[in-house]
Image: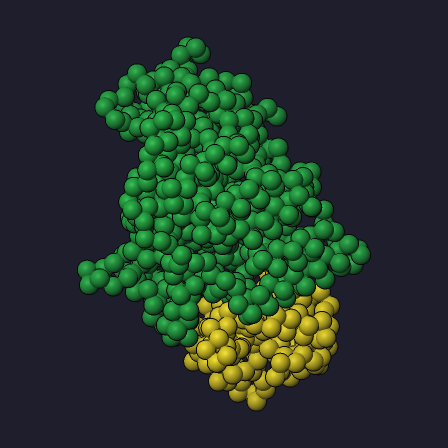
Chain colours: A yellow, B green
Amino acid sequence: MPRLIRWKDGRAEAAEDPFTAVADDEVVPPGDVIISLTRFQVEGEHLLGQGRQVGVRVEPDEAVEALAYDLPRIAVVALAFPKFRDGRAFSAARILRERLNYAGEVRAVGDVLLEQARFMVRCGFDAFEAADGATPRQWAAVATRFHHVYQRAADGREPAFAERVRA
Amino acid sequence: MVYAYDRIDERMLADRAAEFREQCGRRLAGEITEDQFKPIRLMNGLYLQLHAYMLRIAIPYGTLDGAKLRALAHVARTYDRGYGHFTTRTNLQLHWIKLRDAPDILDELAKVGLHAIQTSGNCIRNLTADPHAGATADEVDDPRIWAEAIRQWSTFHPEFSFLPRKFKIAVTAASQDRAAIRVYDIGLRLHRDEDGALAFEVLVGGGLGRTPYLGPTIRERLPVKHLLSYLQAILRVYNRHGRRDNLWKARIKVLVASLGAEEFGRQVDEEWEASDKAAADLPDTELARIRAAFAPRGFDTLPRVSAAFETLEADDRAFARFARHNVKPHKMAGYAIVDVSLKAPGETPGDCSADQMDLIAGLAERYSLDEVRVAYEQNLILPHVRLDDVPDVWRALAEADLATPNIGLISDIIACPGLDYCALANARAIPIAQDIARKFADPELAETIGELKIKISGCINACGHHHVGHIGILGVDKKGEEYYQLTLGGSGEDDASIGQILGPALPADKVTGAVDDLVAVYLRERQGSERFLDTYRRAGLAPFKEAVYAEAH
């Protein structure tokens, strides 16, 4: 099983991944699975009825809003980075957290690189399949390196303008 | 009068400098390859050019003080070849940097609140603003207040650091556009609505490059308190829907043009209405804090006219010419805005030596309330000079070859670094600019010709703004030879327009002659007080084309 980096309470830790990522042309195996949005729209109801955990992989050209009514039943939303330069999933993560109030796991999958750690954490991702083999220790170092932030995002960090009022 | 970084802002720069030092260390130690390092260095303004690394240092909204300019001089002298290049984005580029020095340079810059954050990469780039901000009578507010608010909001923005393409914002609050807002990804024009409240006109999707567009207005009156939530909505629509399959179609201008401004504006409104505006917008207390930093300070009550100025103007023709072209009216009686020309004929447009920077820093401290501005035309400005002091400032500038009286005239040429430095260029831009400037070096002749804006780019990326030059010159590659395509009738100002192609591209040695032909046609055809641009717009392309290509027939 691939090693996951999980982000919780300002810390990164290694975790086993209980989910199997299933491609559209594969048979769904037993256990917890992550399937595509297209497949979820056809088979989701059936799979959830089997009492297992279901995650949905959303590609950057798909709108996360399509999941709005299913979110309470979905254990993982896996947002895909086909290339690290493709930043659409950053918007998708914030919409999931801040607009759709999704409380489940938001996982970064695909070309997920260490240098993006702090942006991903700020946008509300809390699980990472690091493509460059980054360790949780490295991940945490990059995610927490900056002492301040200038804007509100999905991580609830206090922005500079609020710190200034308090100071 | 200039926003001073507080402990939070300083800490942000220090954290970034430390991060970059570590990243450079990993590269120098061979732990990461150049391929892996490239996106990292590009997040911090470090480019690999034809001959060396180039570091692009941000000058937020073109505002400097003496200490910052001295730091730039020090860095140019210590780590480069003793000069720097001011760009059309009001940044400073150092073209001969060694990678191992880059972290030290960033440390030196951070000491005075300078940095290279977001001067490259597909993120929200360093902002530009009206270089006359805080000094001109024709503004409704100081646009730098809003530019600083946007600077902070856009710095390390977690959602918008991997956009489809780079993203540039320009802000003005004046009736005359000196920031070229119609050719920016977002142009913001601050004005007062019917009720007297401050509001932004929001233009989106302007830009130059391969497909030039003038940005359409998507909102006439955005209440200023909603600036950041509205920008977030624009950026989010662009981040989600801008094209990523083709580098040449990835700028927001292509999205706006393909959807139409109305539909794009509708999508922005829909996103904006769905968002939590209060979470994104700055509280009034923070805006007040930033506003206070830009409050006018240090002006004396002076008579409207200065005897010292007027006497010299009457006695000295050279000073009178400088006063006509390089001295602009100030909002305060007895003060003037003084243009420092970085366009001495024969020099590289926008280049400034370390010694010149030190001199200008000294003049700013002594005569201009410690302020210097960078204009996108690649000149510097001393924004708050007493009329009484203009003669002394002029003499000091003239001694350093910085007082060429050519602002807005034919030798005040914009040119990108071109093939002399840039890996993207097809042709050199600097020698063409130098040759034209030498040809028209006679100030009498330049003044007779009047306002004429020549803009030169070494490739289609249009860093030299050729599309909006009254005469635009674009370097192209023809079977390995440098050729130049001329365009006429562009403008980046209030009467913005995209230039029309004159005819087939010309070899390098024919360009100055062609400009001479164009000027001759203008001088022959002009009526009354028409500028070159006005004559072109009235008479059309034909007489100009005929003159330039007559020999070929």
Q: Is residue B208 above or below residue B200?
A: above
Quarter of the rendering occupied by the N terminus of chain A:
bottom right
Q: Is residue B261 above or below residue B549?
A: below
Nearer the observer, B482 or B173: B173
Nearer the observer, B78 or B231: B78
Residue at image position (48%, 85%) is A72
Residue B440 percent location from the top left of the image: 45, 21
The image quarter in which residue B501 lies: top left
Query: Does the image show residue B406?
Result: no
Residue at image position (50%, 22%) is B438
Q: How many marks?
A: 0
Nearer the observer, A133 or B172: B172
Residue B146 percent location from the top left of the image: 39, 60
Residue A73 percent location from the top left of the image: 50, 85
Residue at image position (80%, 56%) is B29
* Residue at far bottom of view: A51
Q: Is residue B78 left or right of B431 when viewed as pictured?
A: right
Nearer the observer, B480 or B404: B404
* Residue at far left of view: B194
Residue B343 percent location from the top left of the image: 49, 32
